Image (spheres, rainbow, N blue to C red):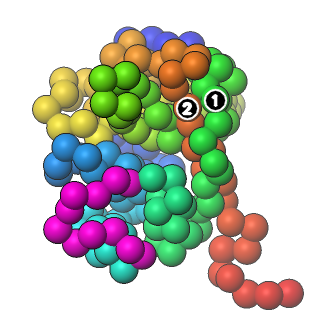
Amino acid sequence: MATTTPIHHSSIAAAGLTRIPMEGTHDDLLAVAACICGKSMSDIKKMAVTLGMRPKGPFNMDEVLFRKILFNCSNYLCSDYKDFLSIAALPDFCVLCCEYSTFDDSFRHVTFRHFRGTATQQAHSVVIDPLPGIDPKLEVTSSFDHLKLEPGSSWYLEITQKANPAGKGK
């Protein structure tokens, strides 16, 4: 499934996604939240602080805070971390946790989106990478070669739509 053909930014725009680069060394999950929610990093950081993140750092962003940000800033929900088995086994929309380092028990996050095939478009998957300074061809790409995705040291957070996005009862 992995190819080296870059996917243009316009293909993810149709899905309401925009690449938002990281601004610091530990805010990849904030950048991914901004991408998924369609908000600026500033808006996402303000929400994170409202939800308990330190305003001036240091901070450790986890899936609990990420889940709260998605709930408050979008129509999406997020699962607990699940074990990565293969690209083919991923859900249509998730956050990949990759490049695990045993040195400091750290990893980084990227947005993954699978687009199902239609009569006019082949099925394909893309990664939206918030890492600053990477080759522009890898910012939004169908290539997974630059990511260390390995079963046992990679995980994902499945992203699903809220059952009732308006938040109204029956």
- Classified by dominant secondary structure, the portion drawn in magenta counts as loop
Q: Which percent across, then down, holds residue 31?
A: 32, 52
The answer to which image quadrant residue 90 occupies is: top right
Determine if the magenta segment contains residue 50. no
Q: Which percent across, then down, holds residue 139?
A: 28, 32
Q: Which percent across, then down, holds residue 49?
A: 32, 74
Asked if 69 appears above or below 79 in the picture, the reply is: below
The answer to which image quadrant residue 118 occupies is: top right
Q: Report how many numbered discs are placed on residues in the image.
A: 2
Kindly tell me whether residue 121 is visible in this rendering: no
- Quadrant, the N terminus: top right
Task: Name the residue type under label 2.
Answer: Trp
Residue at 41% in and 17% down? 148
Query: Is there a contact, CB below 8 Å, between mark 1 and mark 2?
Result: yes
Along the line of sight, which residue is nearer the eye, 160 or 104?
104
Mark number, residue 155: 2
Along the line of sight, which residue is nearer the eye, 75 or 62?
62
Magenta highlight range? 51-61
Along the line of sight, which residue is nearer the eye, 79 or 153?
153
Asked if 50 appears above or below 141 in the picture, the reply is: below
* Secondary element at image label 1: strand
Q: Which percent across, then down, holds residue 129?
A: 33, 35
- At label 1, counting other C-alpha atoms closer than 10 Å, the crowd grade (few under 14, some 14-19, many 20 or more) is some
Q: Is residue 41 left or right of residue 62?
A: left
Q: Residue furthest right?
A: 170
Task: Name the residue type under label 1.
Answer: Asp
Residue ID for mark 1: 83
